[in-house]
Amino acid sequence: MSTLDTSRLPRHIAIIMDGNGRWAKKRGLPRAFGHREGAKVVKEIVTACAQLGIEVLTLYAFSTENWARPKAEIAGLMRILEAYLKRELHTFMENNVRLRVIGDISALPEKPVTALRKVLSATEKNTGMQLNLALNYGGRQELVDGINNALKNGATYVTEKIISDNLYTAGQSDPDLLIRTSGEMRISNFLLWQAAYAEFVVTPVLWPDFNKKHLYNAISEYQTRERRFGGTGRFGGINRIEN
């Protein structure tokens, strides 16, 4: 952390938490073990971001495409989500974190939704970092929902502001930094609108091995970028970092 310029921190960090299955496979374990280890990492990263003073952290937890996975794996993920929410409520309260969900949770099983609603209610008045959990989330679906919502509310045509105001993330700043673990170089239907000018950092580290040091390295890389938002200057683009 000593190498970070605390005056130039990203306001909003988004993370594609990838590599749980590969982490387990490398060890000859079922994929569920990777998901469990990945859930443990979330606590460290949420706490580190809250203590740094990051305003918004968005974690890609379960995509609309993840329903195509085996039923047993999905059921395991839902159990892990429920356990995580029950276990980490005290972490949110200690760090003044407010939880929010982006995505359609109506399709999720009852038990994790009940746990989720309890944490949403308990953290509602917290004033520190906002943690967005992207659950049953898809960027294309978000755009469709946002435009339909705007039309329902009386819009006869859409502008960029109207679209932004009707997205799941309405009222939030767009991500400044988007981190993807596991080395894959794709956005995977995540924050398609909001990430238009995000700086991308891709690390080969699998999510269960990602830690506070890797987070700081990604932020340090972000701080080397010259952000011109389409103007002249050095291109930021996508960088791989070796951790």
Image (tube, rainbow, N blue to C red):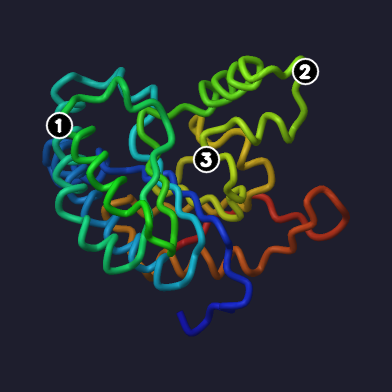
- Is 12 left, or right, of 70 in this rendering? right
Task: Using the image as rendered, state which of residue 79 and residue 128 is in the foreground.
Answer: 128
Looking at the rendered image, the quarter that the C terminus falls into is bottom left
Task: Using the image as rendered, state which of residue 31 and residue 227 is in the foreground.
Answer: 227
Q: How far separated are the C-alphas under marks 1 and 2?
A: 40 Å
Label 1 SS: helix
Looking at the rendered image, the quarter that the N terminus falls into is bottom left
Label 2 SS: loop
Q: Which residue is mark 2?
A: 157
Residue kind at label 1, given as amino acid type? Lys
Q: Which residue is mark 1?
A: 111
Point out which mark residue 185 bears: 3
| Residue 62, percent from left and from top | 34, 33
| x 77%, y 18%: residue | 157
| Residue 32, percent from left and from top | 15, 37
Q: How far separated are the C-alphas under marks 1 and 3?
A: 34 Å
Task: Using the image as rendered, state which of residue 155 and residue 146 is in the foreground.
Answer: 155
Q: Is residue 93 above or below residue 2?
A: above
Q: CB under 8 Å between callouts 2 and 3? A: no
- The earlier-in-sequence mark between 1 and 2 is 1
Point out which mark residue 240 bears: none
| x 69%, y 47%: residue | 197
Residue extending furthest bottom?
2
Label 3 SS: loop
Q: CB under 8 Å between callouts 1 and 3? A: no
Res 135 quadrant in image: top left
Residue extending furthest right?
232
Residue kind at label 3, given as amino acid type? Met
